[in-house]
Amino acid sequence: MLKDFTFIEQRELTQHVSLAKTSQGLSYLVIKNDAAEGLVSLFGAHVLHYQAKNHEPLLWVSHTTAQDGVKPFRGGIPLCWPWFGPASEEIGSGKPSHGFARITEWQLDSIDDQAACTQLHLSLHSSEQTKAYWSYDFDLELTVTIGQTLELALTTHNTDQKPLTYRSALHSYFYTKDTKDVCIRGLGSHYLDKVAKQEKEQIGDFQLTQWVDSIYTQPEARVQFTTGFDTVQLNNAGDNSVVVWNPWADNAAKTDDFDSDRWQNMVCVETALTGEGTTVKPGKSHTLSVVMSYLQK
Ligand code: TA6
């Protein structure tokens, strides 16, 4: 389990899931079943750790991440919702980057627990607190399935009387051996290079050689990448883009919760709903999901 998280108490909920608390008062779900182990914070419904038997950890978490229930964790799978990046003028200035789902306490609704597969059901419901950020009524559900694969499904239910448009990303930080080991395929050809501030065409597979912050707008449903430990496949659904990010040395050094000496050991490959996002009619729902699996060596 992640050595950066020290629990002062732990209580069994099911055969493979316990509820742990830290001295900062945050609650975490610790999962250990026959196939894998995982760690999910109720703050932000944030998957922080997943490690399948006979594999390295899949996710990267900064050793200097905040754990204060105010700042979002740095690493794992932050849930960017109901917007991606800075809030638009329409939403209003001064709102948190990547939305408020990752900085809000979620509730655990239920656990489906089997020997080699544990499914957590978490939810976040509109409230006075959320309406300070975003005026809509909504129910947001996250299902996390921990087994030989890691699956996340984020479902937005529009319980308002008017259509809502949202953007989102399962902002996954993957653990890599080194930048030179990263090769990504299935991103499609067109992307928005946020570093160069240009639209570009991807020629061949993606190699990680410099600061990258790119939104691929025509990805295939299956994106595959190498980490130096494994070849990982993402089966994405409900998305309209995949975001690739690595801050590189200078930006990592300038970010206090980002390890300045471990930026070479991560790459973000994000299942995302960016640009126009998607509009959900009153009473309807939309799901953004990813299945993460290992391809045989
Ligand atoms: O997904 C890439 C990105 O939008 C980058 O621009 C960078 O800001 C990254 O997300 C991390 O954002 P955060 O708010 O978590 O520091």
Image (cartoon, grey):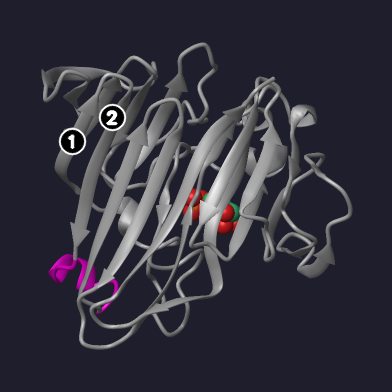
Residue at left 45%, top 21%?
51
Q: Amino acid at mark 1?
A: Ile
**Does the magenta stretch mainly form a helix, a strand or a loop?**
loop
Label 2 SS: strand
Q: Quadrant of residue 215?
A: bottom right
Q: Residues within 10 Å of mark 2 (few under 14, many from 20)?
A: many
Image marks 2 and 1: residues in contact by CB distance under 8 Å? yes
Label 1 SS: strand
The correct choice, above or below, for 221 with respect to 174 in the image is below
Residue at left 16%, top 33%?
25
What range is drawn magenta here?
A: 126-135
Image x and y of residue 86, in percent: 49, 68
Can residue 139 be seen from the camera position used here? yes
Q: Residues within 10 Å of mark 1 (few under 14, many from 20)?
A: some
* Residue occupying the far bottom of the picture: 162
Any mark on residue 118, and which? 2
Q: Quadrant of the N terminus?
A: top left
Q: Give the residue number, with chain letter if any, for mark 1.
A: 111
Q: Earlier in the sequence, mark 2 or mark 1?
A: 1
Image x and y of residue 16, in percent: 22, 20
Image x and y of residue 155, in percent: 33, 60
